[in-house]
Amino acid sequence: MKSNVTPHKLLLTWVNCASVRWATRVQDVFTAGKLLALILIIIMGIVQICKGEYYWLEPANAFEPFQDYDVGLIALAFLQGSFAYGGWNFLNYVTEELVDPYVNLPRAIFISIPLVTFVYVFANIAYVTAMSPQELLASNAVAVTFGEKLLGVMSWIMPISVALSTFGGVNGSLFTSSRLFFAGAREGHLPRLLAMIHVKRCTPIPALLFTCISTLLMLCTSDMYTLINYVGFINYLFYGVTVAGQIVLRVKQPDMHRPIKISLVWPVIYLLFWAFLLIFSLYSEPVVCGIGLAIMLTGVPVYFLGVYWDNKPQCFDTFVDKMTYLGQKFCVVVYPVEDEKKNEESGEEIELKEQSVPLSAEDEQTPKSADC
């Protein structure tokens, strides 16, 4: 598995570094391929139901317990199941690259979440028309097993579809997560090199490389479910804190300009579900969740060293500046700075300029701006 994932990750990192347009085209193509495969699965499921193959959909069998009910395991099932819906918040990371984000961001979320929910629910209904719950749990790739049972000589379609789905998922995660590091660096919470973009391609190459390296480190564990529990627990912990912050800001700063505003009922409902999920997941898998918390807390000393500590020794600042300089030369990147006056007047135009560290000693050959 590790040997298969690594070249795909490196290839997609190169694509995202080369062009934002290429990355979005790759995402469009592979998302379309994934949806076509899921539609094929749903159609096959409907055919199975029409043939009378719905034993595991009958209420007497569908709710038959195979082990004692445990609220901790139910919470853990929600945590793992939510991994399939993990892209619901990714679009927020790339709002600066959206056209008219105040209109298109809510529209994309309103369309995508019901669509994904519909497709995933009906795909799972289709699976149980051909497979028992025991077979579902035993299969490493449910769609592949489903295809082997029903497609016959055309069963090769499903492994290819799974590969396309994985490829597109990795590309989407890489595209969006790198923007998270980019924004963090711009706020001063990460090395400023990560907030720089290529002088011509306007892609955040340092942030993309950092994302690639950090995700490859996750391959140190071969247990996918343990990794999902690590990531899922930490993700939902931060999701809850973020949503709680929205409520706090609404109370403390009620007059703040909010282009996108929703009722506080939804954040409160989410927080109630969030509390149930985290508390009982921690109860069910204390070791796994504890390790996830420990991984998260490793960022605390980094924060105090890099952000909170103001009076750093000169040698430390010199070392960081040299590393930033080398990173700029290696990636051919500059730091984008908004021209505030122009931005206030037009609301749209942003001038990207180089700041502090030049790319080369020759002023005549140094790019003074990244015209994106």
Image (spheres, rainbow, N blue to C red):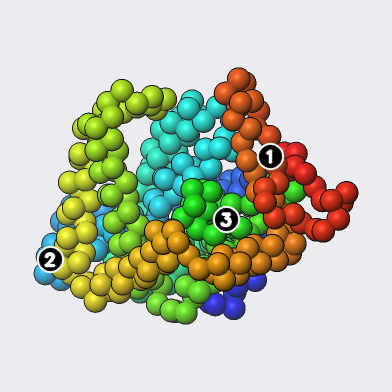
| Quadrant of the rendered image containing residue 117 | top left
Give the labeled residue for mark 3: 192
Whichever of callouts 2 and 3 sits on the residue coming sooner in the sequence is: 2
- What amino acid is labelled 1 in the image? Leu
Q: Amino acid at mark 2?
A: Asp
In the rendered image, the vertical position of residue 195 relative to residue 326, given as above or below: above
Q: Residue 167 — which label?
A: none
Measured Cα–Cα span from mark 1 to mark 3: 15 Å
Q: Which residue is mark 2?
A: 70
Whether pointer 1 and pointer 3 mark residues with C-beta atoms closer than 8 Å, the reply is: no
Query: Most extreme residue toward the top, as rendered?
Result: 345
Could you tell which of marks 1 and 3 lies nearer the N-terminus? 3
Q: Is residue 260 visible?
A: yes
Q: For residue 68, which quarter of the picture?
A: bottom left
Q: Secondary structure at mark 3?
A: helix
At a point 20% along the width and 40% down the height, the residue shown is: 269
Residue sitting nearer the eye, 334 or 1: 334
